[in-house]
Amino acid sequence: MSPKQHRGEVTADLLLDAALRLFAEQGEQGLTVNAVTKASGVSLGSLYHHFGSLDGLFDALAQRWLSRLLSELITALQATRTARTGIRAIVRTHLTFVREHRDAALLLHSARTDQRNMIQARELRDSQEARLSVFATWVQSHVDSGELAPLPLPLLESLVLGPLIGVVRRWLSGIDDVELDLDEAARVLPERIWRSVAADPK
């Protein structure tokens, strides 16, 4: 990597890190071009050079953390032998990620990210194709072995991730009078999710 490329990466990282801090501290309304350039110490011109727009910066930030989450999930999944232990690994890895990277989890589960994902659904899947294909292959192998119910992949994904994402969003919002316990969720959810996707849920 040339010195110029290295400086470019450092500049981009400064902008991305500042954007995440602002989003976590102030929400979407705090994520403005002026706030990001001030917090990062990077010029307006550099922001536009690297990301094209504030939306471009936001998309890059979401992609950075989604890639990291998916990588951790795939690594955990590949260390398992059965579909049941795979479900447990997905749940526990996701919840650990959320606890350790709360700011990033807030971003990934935000209304703005949902909106951007709806607009760019195909581009998003294309950008994560390598990781998502690993998950698809894992699912198909366990459908073929008779462990997982022979359901369409999008439906299996929804049955596995839907309850998990619901719990994460409630925990992040802090709306419950009694704090939602992620450790309890990590104990309870794997078996409940397993029953919804198992070919023979005994």
Image (tube, helix red, strand yellow):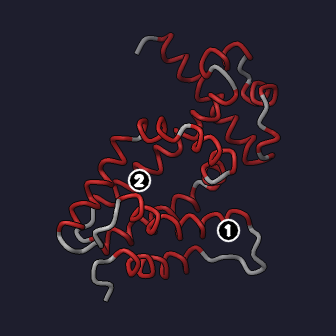
Please name the amino acid that badge 2 sits on. Answer: Glu
- 128 to 49, vertically: above or below: below
Tell me: 20 left or right of 151. right
Q: Residue at x 58, y 44 (%)?
A: 118
The numbered dot on residue 72 is 2
The local secondary structure at tag 1 comes to helix
Would residue 3 be found to the left or right of residue 141 on screen?
A: right
Q: Residue furthest bottom?
A: 202
Question: Which corner quadrant holds the C terminus?
Answer: bottom left
Type of amino acid under label 1:
Arg
Q: In the picture provided, is 82 more to the left or to the right than 46?
A: left
Residue 8 % position (x, y): 55, 17
Where does the image place residue 5, in percent across and percent down from the top left? 48, 14
User: In the picture provided, is 68 more to the left or to the right than 22?
Assistant: left
The disc label shown at residue 52, or none = none
Q: Which of disc 1 and disc 2 is earlier in sequence?
A: 2
Query: Which is nearer the eye, 7 or 88?
Result: 88
Which residue has dot 1 on it?
A: 170
Corner quadrant of residue 160: bottom left
Please tell me which residue lies in front, 132 or 9: 132
Residue at position x 52%, y 39% in the image: 64
Disc 2 from disc 1: Cα separation: 22 Å
Q: Residue at x 25, y 54 (%)?
A: 137
**Nearer the camera: disc 2 or disc 1:** 1
Q: Report helix, strand or loop for mark 2.
A: helix
Residue nearest the observer in this picture, 163 or 42: 163
Task: Tell whether label 1 touches label 2 (CB within 8 Å).
Answer: no
Instruction: Indicate the position of residue 106 as horizontal and vertical percent values.
Output: 66, 53
Spot the residue most to the left.
145
Compared with 45, 41 (above or below) is: below
Disc 1 residue crowd, few under 14, some 14–19, many 20+, Cα 10 Å: few
